[in-house]
Amino acid sequence: MVVVQINKEEKKIMLTKPLQLAKESDSEESYRAPNLLQRLLSLFKNVRPGSDLTRFQLPPQFNLPKSQLQCYGESVYCTASDLLSICNKGQSPLDRFISVVAWSISTTRPISFGVAPYNPILGETHHVSKGNLNVLLEQVSHHPPVTALHATDKKENIEITWSQQPVPKFYGTSVEAQVRGKRQLKLLDHGETYEMNSPNLFFRILPVPGADWVGTVDIRCIETGLVAELSYKSGHSFLGLGGSHKVIKGKIFDSSSLKVIYELDGHWDRTVKMKDRENGKVAVIYDATEVITRLQAPILKDEKSVWPTESVHVWSGLSQAIVSKDWEKAREAKQVVEERQRELMRERDSKGENWIPKHFVVSYSKEVGWDCTPIHNYVSAAPIIAL
């Protein structure tokens, strides 16, 4: 993973390559500490099966040099081809729906066993632009961890809003993180709103370590009634051996008539094909090698405009230590960030103040869950530019 380092107020802002399919010599695996599996098993030795791991803290040896906010953002703005523009240019509602399904699959990114990004701090932000697409994320809750995302493209007249709440649980030999929250994509020129959810993260510890996406993703267009059901499967047997990995199977149908139009089959890290139920024709709707390979680290266009809450600024010291494999310095850097957050919380408590997000209006109900509404209609251009 290539690291770009830029001086800022005696700190270094580190801009790393996004997670992608390409297996390179400088991949995220190089950040792992020795004896990874043994260390991981020792972490969970006192954790009971079924436990909620939301508040579980990983030592720096298990961290990638980037925040979870960056990973969420990368899945939207880091693509080698402009799938969002393709969504907008579809001639018919069905053409646009198929393109939205392909775009949704593209947000599924590779994960590595044994390493994870940082848990974002309250109020942390990530602000990046790619072409005409401006993306902004904010950590709007710490316990439970909730992230809000807003992205806009004025040229294509596209808007994206997400809310994400990972709920990881330990099951003895595995960890599964349910990713709660609603994803919404609006093609404003066509008056179409697409709603979808996220698959869950699955980490197998024994007998064969591995990581994958599992679960069901539903994608629906409110106005046209078109629906896609995608089933993500690891493909492993009970013992973690054999089978076909990273599988997607599903269908596209009309919700009013329940008529199946296309059957979907493939792998999210390779290709996904659709078969026309009427004439049997097969076409590739998604090719991962064309979309999530050859991705480059972003660049810093305007150093002075980087907010103090920006992920790469908040975690700069820790990221430097991880890249250098200086684990003692990494532990100290992580403690500095965590203690500062505890100090701010004590200050708010002493004044009787509640923390309020800066970029979103946030509410919660048992019926709806977390609702994160952007304060502004459009996201501004960012000082960090994705290539």
Image (tube, rainbow, N blue to C red):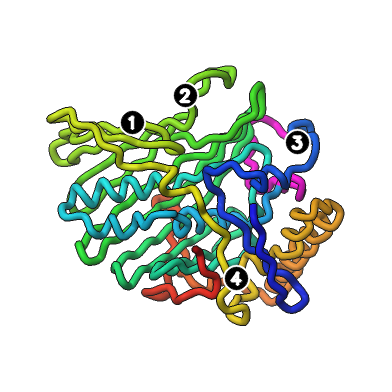
Query: Looking at numbered disc 3 in the image, what kind of residue is underneath it?
Result: Leu
- Residue visible at 75% across and 60% down in the picture: 320
The residue lying toward the viewer, choosing from 290 and 35, is 290
Say whether residue 8 is left or right of residue 111.
right
Q: Main secondary structure of the magenta part?
A: loop
Task: Name the residue beneath numbered marker 4.
Answer: 355
C-alpha separation, residue under disc 2 versus residue under disc 3:
25 Å
From the viewer's perspective, is the residue at label 4 or at label 3 nearer?
3
Task: Name the residue beneath numbered marker 3.
Answer: 36
Query: Looking at numbered disc 2 in the image, what kind of residue is underneath it?
Result: Ser
Query: Looking at numbered disc 1 in the image, what kind of residue is underneath it?
Result: Asp
Q: Which mark is residue 235?
A: none
Q: Position of residue 348 (x, y in %)?
A: 68, 73
C-alpha separation, residue under disc 1 versus residue under disc 2:
12 Å
Task: Name the residue beneath numbered marker 2.
Answer: 244
- Residue visible at 43% across and 73% down in the picture: 379
What SS does tag 4 mark?
loop
- Residue visible at 76% across and 54% down in the picture: 322
Judged from this view, the residue extending furthest toward the right is 328
- Say which label, 1 or 2, has the lower sequence index: 2
